[in-house]
Image (cartoon, helix red, strand yellow):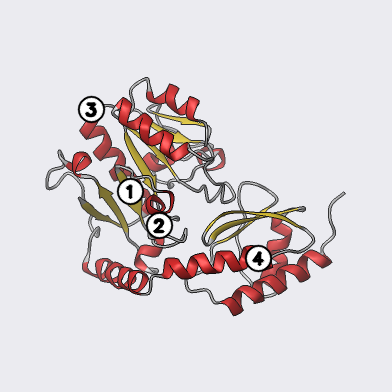
Amino acid sequence: MRRGGDSGAEANEAAFRVARGATGRRRVVATLGSFHGRTMGALAATGLEKYRKGVLGLGSDVVHVPFGDLRAAEAALSEGAAAFILETVQSMGGALMPPAGYLEGLRRLCDSTGAFLVFDEVQTGLGRLGAPSAAQAFGVTPDLQTFAKGLGSGVPIGALLASPKAAAGVKVGDLGSTFGGGPLACAAAEATLAEVAGRKLWEHVAAMEALIRETFTMPGLTRIQGRGLLLGLVLDRPAKDVQKALVAKGVLTGTSEEANILRLLPPLTVSAEEVAELRGALADVLAGAAVPA
């Protein structure tokens, strides 16, 4: 089943509705450090307190467990859950990777407890990880996948993909929104998918990741984490100061919930020359910025 919407938050809430309808259960398990959107249902699953602070009415049917902790996941799922949702690579967490065996373990736990496994691929999908999707990057198949952001190349869109089992009980009219699945958004998504798949941009993404890891060796940068072109540069100083200095040089980067991690999410078409430009600007900034005592 494919369902159109206007945003990632909407796609995630549709996933919750499908999972709850199929299982007859209320509980959703999510991970600490995750971001799933700002609408009420998606915000309830978001595991970052700064977005939830002061928001009333989020309910008690979503529980959070530490990312990467299979024992905590097993305990939460054993109490009867409709779904387990996660970002396979936590973007706002600083491009935090799942521990080895974690996703496979979640797949087994969901199978044994009857819960649906949901991959929020709003940031990881469409080639971002060096594969068509996170499911393909890690070799683990979820029951539900959500997509948005790059799917429309700037045109607002969200999408939910559901397995036959998950979608079996969904009827016409159960899911929908005023502009969800409209012709403009769908045309943008169709063109984007044709470009990404036709050019196999995930292969270029993997090549650019390799180039970054090979050439970004400089004082002040301690390590690189993440996958594909969703990368976290772990610095020896606050990332916000470095980000501001890079903006002054005409280079846009992101920060994360981890103070010392600078996030990279460049376009999938970023060139080797642009990677070199980023490297030079970052090296200059790190060489000139004082390391805090």
Residue at the spot of label 4: 214
Residue 79, above or below 204? above
Where residue 235 appears, as percent x and y from the top left, is: 73, 54
Residue at image location 22% in from the left, 56% down from the top: 178
Name the N-terminal-most of marks 2 and 4: 2
Residue at the spot of label 2: 125
Residue at image location 14% in from the left, 47% down from the top: 173
Residue 20, above or below 253? above
Q: Nearer the viewer, residue 193 or 108?
A: 108
Name the N-terminal-most of marks 3 and 4: 3
Check disc 3: other Cα within 10 Å, few if <14, some if 14-19, many if 20+: few
Q: Give the alpha-carbon distance from disc 2 to disc 3, as whole Å.
A: 29 Å
Check disc 2: other Cα within 10 Å, few if <14, some if 14-19, many if 20+: many
Residue at the spot of label 3: 24
Residue at the spot of label 1: 145
Q: Give the alpha-carbon distance from disc 3 to disc 1, as whole Å.
A: 20 Å
Frontmost of labels 3 and 1 is: 1
Q: Give the alpha-carbon distance from disc 2 to disc 1, as whole Å.
A: 9 Å
Q: Give the alpha-carbon distance from disc 4 to disc 1, as whole Å.
A: 32 Å
Label 3 secondary element: loop
Residue at image location 48% in from the left, 38% down from the top: 101
Where residue 9 appears, as percent x and y from the top left, is: 37, 49
Check disc 4: other Cα within 10 Å, few if <14, some if 14-19, many if 20+: few
Q: Is residue 12 left or right of residue 258?
A: left
